Image (tube, grey):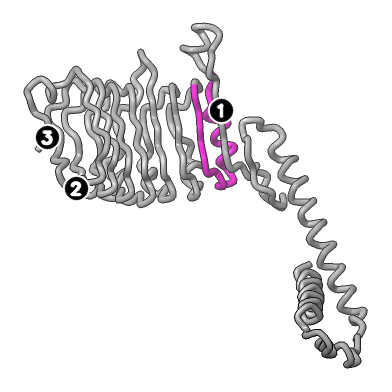
């Protein structure tokens, strides 16, 4: 197809050059048309080349059709997979899911709110191919992350809201493509109890951290390996006493601290020249003892 396009482009350029020569030739002079009087020999394209060219085109068309049909067949049973890759189904029977969205934005009853549908098996199944790039789960139960997520090395977005999650696995630091992580708990449930101490030591692309309603979370891991972090939001983490240093977050531009009653101090923010938004909302000791940073 590319060869045919190049051939056509060459013919068009020759025609344009010939036309321009006719237009700009002086009156009374014989207009010179490049190669107009020179016999041009047209060699026919070898039949073998034509056969190979047609075979390649047919192979591409058939391969594309098979990849689309195979992926559609594998993913049709999973409406939560809103975007999937087109791949041949050889020995792999996993849906090559790219974006998984499993949400219930408006539970109709209190029972549906308290005892939401368990999304663990669904996430486990759709993460099996290792192709996930985005995971969004809202009003679904997902207390822990399936081991299959560990193989999703292109995962860049994790959004878990009202999932009753309690632990983040120690291998979360291996998701080096992660750019955004948002984990919000549900009122009346334990929610996050802790985070791995080395979770943020090597996530070079991470730009947003949002944690909300985690009444048992006592400590935030050091932010030593997130040089692209731009936004940090902490809301209703009742046991949090202190924040990690922001010394290695040069791009931090947004810091939201809301309803942190045990927070005593804020690390030095004077080197953070890109910081354009700082919100500290009561109750907390920071605003009650007069400390506003250095």
Q: CA distance from mark 2 to mark 1?
A: 37 Å
Residue corresponding to mark 3: 293
Which residue is tagged 2?
247
Q: Which mark is residue 102?
A: 1
Region in magenta? 117-138
Horizontal and vertical percent for residue 83?
Answer: 63, 40
- In percent of the image, x 76 and y 75: which residue is there? 13
**Mark toward the viewer: 1 or 3:** 3
Residue with the most extreme bottom position = 38
Residue in the picture at 29% in, 24% down: 235
Q: Nearer the viewer, mark 2 or mark 1?
A: 2
Task: Please state if 105 lies on the left or on the right of 262 as rendered.
Answer: right
Q: Marks 1 and 2: in contact by CB < 8 Å? A: no
Residue at 46 percent across and 40 percent down: it is 157
Q: Is 125 inside the magenta-drawn segment? A: yes
Q: Name the one closer to the observer, 256 or 88.
A: 256
Q: Position of residue 186 (x, y in %)?
A: 39, 18
Residue 279 lies in what quarter of the image? top left
Residue 211 appears in which quarter of the rendering?
Answer: top left
Quadrant where the N terminus is found in the figure: bottom right
């Amino acid at each position: 197809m590319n060869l045919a396009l190049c051939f056509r482009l060459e013919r068009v350029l020759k025609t344009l050059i010939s036309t321009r020569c006719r237009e700009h030739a002086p009156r009374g002079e014989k207009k010179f048309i490049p190669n107009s009087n020179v016999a041009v020999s047209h060699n026919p394209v070898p039949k073998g080349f034509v056969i190979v060219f047609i075979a390649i085109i047919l192979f591409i068309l058939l391969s594309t059709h098979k990849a689309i049909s195979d992926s559609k067949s594998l993913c049709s049973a999973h409406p939560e997979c809103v975007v999937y890759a087109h791949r041949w189904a050889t020995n792999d029977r996993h849906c090559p899911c790219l974006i998984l969205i499993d949400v219930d934005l408006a539970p109709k009853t209190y029972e549906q709110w308290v005892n939401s549908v368990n999304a663990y098996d669904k996430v486990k199944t759709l993460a099996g191919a290792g192709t996930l790039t985005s995971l969004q789960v809202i009003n679904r139960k997902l207390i822990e992350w399936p081991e299959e997520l560990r193989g999703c090395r292109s995962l860049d977005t994790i959004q878990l809201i009202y999932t009753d999650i309690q632990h983040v696995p120690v291998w979360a630091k291996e998701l080096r493509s992660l750019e955004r992580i948002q984990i919000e708990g549900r009122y009346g449930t334990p929610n996050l109890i802790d985070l791995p101490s080395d979770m943020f030591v090597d996530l070079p692309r991470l730009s947003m951290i949002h944690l909300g309603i985690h009444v048992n979370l006592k400590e935030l891991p050091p932010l030593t390996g997130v040089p692209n972090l731009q936004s940090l939001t902490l809301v209703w983490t009742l046991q949090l006493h202190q924040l990690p240093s922001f010394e290695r977050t040069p791009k931090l531009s947004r810091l939201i601290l809301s309803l942190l009653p045990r927070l005593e101090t804020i690390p030095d923010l004077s080197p953070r020249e890109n910081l354009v938004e700082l919100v500290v909302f009561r109750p907390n000791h920071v605003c009650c003892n007069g400390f506003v940073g250095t």
